[in-house]
Image (cartoon, grey):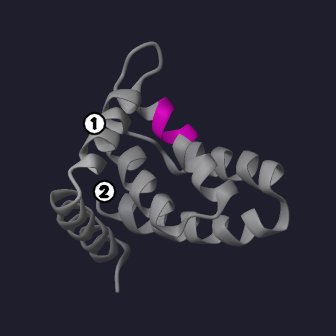
Amino acid sequence: MSYKAELEKIVSILNELSSKAPELQEFLKYVHEAESAKTLDTKTKELISLGIAIAVRCEPCIIWHTNAVVNAGATMDEILDVIKVAVCMGGGPALMYALKAYNVAKEFLAGKK
């Protein structure tokens, strides 16, 4: 399955779950507000989120935030810098999740050319 298809599946299930558990919609509103451009622009916030996703080893988060950061205009070089910092913070396990982030970024950036 492609990462784009995986992302579509994540979004679909999240929408289904939040429709059945409306309390989660409040959290999703908070996430939207926290991630919106204010002092930091969207790309910067998504780069931070991607780094955290790698360090905490969250595969769905890596897919979600890689897509978001690519859509916000990040380059592979910027993503690679984030990967390096995340591995510094997360060690060997983060390195293995960095491989996932790198492959997801390659797929999502390929669609931008």
Query: Mark 1 highlights which residue?
Result: 29
Tag 2's secondary structure?
Answer: loop
Give the alpha-carbon distance from disc 2 to disc 1, as whole Å.
Answer: 32 Å
Which residue sits at x=57%, y=42%?
Answer: 78
Circle 2 Cα neighbour tier, 10 Å, few/some/many (<14 / 14–19 / ≥20) = few
Looking at the rendering, the stretch of residues picked out in magenta corresponds to 44-48
In the rendered image, which quarter contains the N terminus? bottom left
* Closer mark to the observer between disc 2 and disc 1: 1
In the rendered image, which quarter contains the C terminus? bottom left
Locate residue 7 relative to residue 106 in the image: left or right.
Answer: left
Which residue sits at x=36%, y=22%?
Answer: 37
Q: Compared to 89, does 111 lie above or below?
A: below
Which residue sits at x=71%, y=50%?
Answer: 86
Query: Mark 2 highlights which residue?
Result: 113
Which residue sits at x=18%, y=63%?
Answer: 20
Residue 63 image point, x, y percent: 43, 63
Q: Compared to 12, does 46 lie above or below?
A: above
Front residue (pair 92, 26): 26
103 part of magenta stretch: no
Single out the residue that lies furthest toward the top.
39
Residue 51 image point, x, y percent: 62, 47
Tag 1's secondary structure?
Answer: helix
Mark closer to the chain start, 2 or 1: 1
Residue 65 image point, x, y percent: 44, 51
Q: Compared to 73, does 95 lie above or below?
A: below
* Residue type at tag 2: Lys
Task: Name the image quarter holding residue 14.
Answer: bottom left
* Residue type at tag 1: Lys
